[in-house]
Amino acid sequence: MSTEAAVRELLLVMPRLVGRVKRIPPPEQLRGLDLAPRHLSLFSLLLLDGPMTVSELAAKLGVAPTTVSLIVGDLTRKGVLVRREDEADRRRRIIDISADSRPAISQWLSPGAHAWRHALDPLTAEQQRAFIDTLLRYEQYFAADG
């Protein structure tokens, strides 16, 4: 397949993919919270990697700690996230999904995880890495105002 043929195919499939993902409605308790893709990434990190600090979240999301702090503050006030003291260092706060919100968020995000597993399972580890690197380069192009 030529690069131009691959680009054509991706230009056709990407809008459909995004449209289908956007049609997965958020759980009832999260509707009206004006959630953006960055919220989904934050929820995914906390579900998959467990509780962490604002600095750790910011590093993994590739955004400023102040941005994460604002998101966490907003979602904590709304009861979606919780902050607790770090037992090892009481000056640090650990962020997690609230017990009340965890089942709904997990159920909401699981179709995406299942779809990625379905798509990636047939690939070798090297092919998976190449696919992810390709998506990251695509994202980086737009982050740099392509």
Image (cartoon, helix red, strand yellow):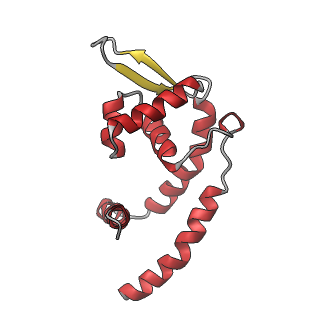
Judge left or right: residue 74 versus residue 124. Answer: right
Work out whether residue 114 can be spotted: yes
Q: Which residue is at a point 37% across and 28% down the rendered structure image? A: 52
Judge left or right: residue 98 versus residue 31. Answer: left
| Furthest residue in direction right, as rendered | 28
Q: Is residue 40 above or below residue 72?
A: below
How many dots with numbers? 0
Image coordinates for residue 105, horizontal then vertical, percent: 59, 37
Q: Nearer the viewer, residue 42 or 77?
A: 77
Image coordinates for residue 73, horizontal then vertical, percent: 48, 27
Q: Nearer the viewer, residue 3 or 29?
A: 29
Image coordinates for residue 34, horizontal then vertical, percent: 61, 43
Judge left or right: residue 5 versus residue 27. Answer: left
> In which image quadrant can residue 27 be found?
top right
Q: Nearer the viewer, residue 17 or 117?
A: 17
Work out whether residue 1 can be spotted: no
> In which image quadrant can residue 64 be found?
top left
Q: Nearer the viewer, residue 103 or 143?
A: 143
Quadrant showing the N terminus: bottom left
Quadrant showing the C terminus: bottom left
Q: Is residue 76 above or below residue 64?
A: above
Q: Which residue is at a point 33% across and 46% down the rendered structure image? A: 62
Q: Which residue is at a point 36% across and 30% down the rendered structure image? A: 54
Image coordinates for residue 114, horizontal then vertical, percent: 54, 51
> In which image quadrant can residue 26 be found?
top right
Q: Is residue 128 above or below residue 35?
A: below
